[in-house]
Image: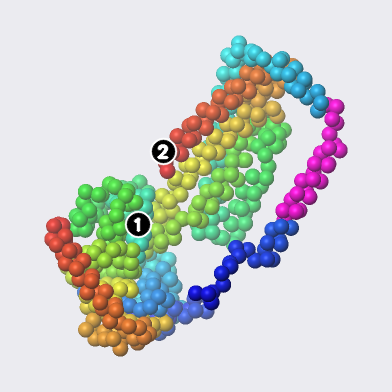
Amino acid sequence: MLELQGLTKTYKTGDTALSDVSFSVPKGQIVGLIGPSGAGKSTLIRCINRLVEPTSGRIVLGGRDLTGLGVRDLRAQRRRIGMIFQEYALVERLSVMENVLSGRLGYVGFWASFTRRFPPADIQRAYRLLDRVGLMTHADKRADALSGGQRQRVGIARALAQEPELLLVDEPTASLDPKTSRQIMRLLVEICTESGLPAIVNIHDVPLAQQFMQRIIGLRAGQVVFDGTPAQLTESALTEIYGSEDWTAMRKGHEDDKDAEADALRRLSVLPA
Amino acid sequence: MSDFPASWQFRSPKARLALWFGWLCLVALFVWCWQVMNERTIWMFVQDAPKQAADIGGRMWPPRWSYLGELMVPLWDTLNMATLGTLLGVILAVPVAFMAARNTSPFPLILRPIALFIIVASRSINSLIWALLLVAILGPGLLAGIIAIGLRSIGFIGKLLYEGIEETDIRQVEAITATGASQAQVLNYAIVPQILPAFWGITVFRWDINIRESAILGLVGAGGLGLKLQNSLNTLAWPQVTLILLVILATVVLSEWVSAKVRAAII
């Protein structure tokens, strides 16, 4: 589905953020990208939809090379890639509905979007997605009136409104509490599984990654140093990615989170599926 | 415990010396200015200032209320001049601001310096001077006043607006770009919503300033209340001057109130 070949990014300052990153993601696979701060996780995800221009290498999505596309073609290809952000990146002063519909901007002309006259099919899809993420009643609220978890749900609905073939998720839970984090991760995984949507999820929380991801890729200093299942992510593998540290402390923290998790489960069952 | 230093100073000795020297210079400047002022002032005139002030005050009071009817049309002209001038300023300033902002300028290398120059040029000339020039070009009347107000407003609105545009949250722009939106759509969906409150605040604030400025533009022939003020001053009709000043005061208070209301409503 997605194939990265020798992706390299060197910033103008001379810092190499990525060097020769190659891997492929088959349809329906959810990949967690872990690594220390500055390992190039964010750069990698932004290279895929070319918010950051890679220095060399190829990005092939469903047989189509995304590198070297002109502005118009790039826009058309970006529609195929949904993106979810760390601090939601909603347009705070627009309504929830406008934020979700903005996922359709690549498909509608300027005047239609300027006058907010989207095709009926887009509006229906937006309502369906809002219902899916449990925010049906909030459609006409302003985005800044929502809580963190609710905003990230709007972010998810916006990305899905694009009807993407790939989801890029950049630290989706970094600004959320543990309970909400798990709710959001579960929602993401459910949605991806439902429609066989592949996703690359940038995540700094290792236990969370192990719990929800099917495959984990570890980045260190811009290079892939681990690629395997969560079960294969042993202490020595973590040391390889992050450098030495007492990992048992983190595991213990994970146990604490289990309580929050149980609580979250109870709460989730009340929410519409 | 005792191994750590017990004293810590907010400023380094060098910074303290520089600060002390700075204050010394300020005091010296003040003393020198005082001296210059003393030399250039004719104290004889100052001595009878209270008497003169009382004299003018006596002539100015009471205001000639019957003159009020004659002021209504010039007052209306003044308000129109301020409003239309602000409108003209806004229309011209918005594209200039987008060209001046680093993150929205289409060709930053060429267009940014041009836009910044327009802003500086507009700001460096007072509306009264703009009006003086325009009265000479267009002849006396409201049109010169409207354009003068508009030209002066470009710089003010343009500068504040482009700073607002540069302060917009890049992540929201990134998110809209990632959906495959065009440049125009990114502007419309990610940047405009972020700067709209600033835009209305700036516009209403400038309108408020423009009402004050347009009240005196008549002094150089641009119509409105200022024209009446000039006529009254020329004929030494002090009670009329008082009334005009009172009308200007009332208008400004009213416009302040309106702009405060509008700003409170949008933020």
Name the side, left or right, on which B146 lies relative to A138: right
Which residue is outermost to the front? B2
Q: In the rendered structure, does residue B136 fall within the stretch colored magenta?
A: no
The residue located at (48%, 45%) in the rendering is B199
The answer to which image quadrant residue A207 occupies is bottom left
The residue located at (46%, 55%) in the rendering is B168
Q: Is residue A218 above or below residue B113?
A: below
The residue located at (81%, 46%) in the rendering is B32
Residue range of the region highlighted in magenta in the rendering: B22-45
Q: Secondary structure at mark 1?
A: loop
Q: Secondary structure at mark 2?
A: helix
Subunit that carries the residue with mark 1: A
C-beta proximity under 8 Å, tags 2 and 1: no
- Residue corresponding to mark 2: B265
Kind of residue at disc 2: Ala
Labels 2, 1: one chain: no
**Distance CA(mark 2)–CA(mark 1):** 23 Å
Kind of residue at disc 1: Leu
- Residue corresponding to mark 1: A90
Quarter that holds the C terminus of chain B = top left
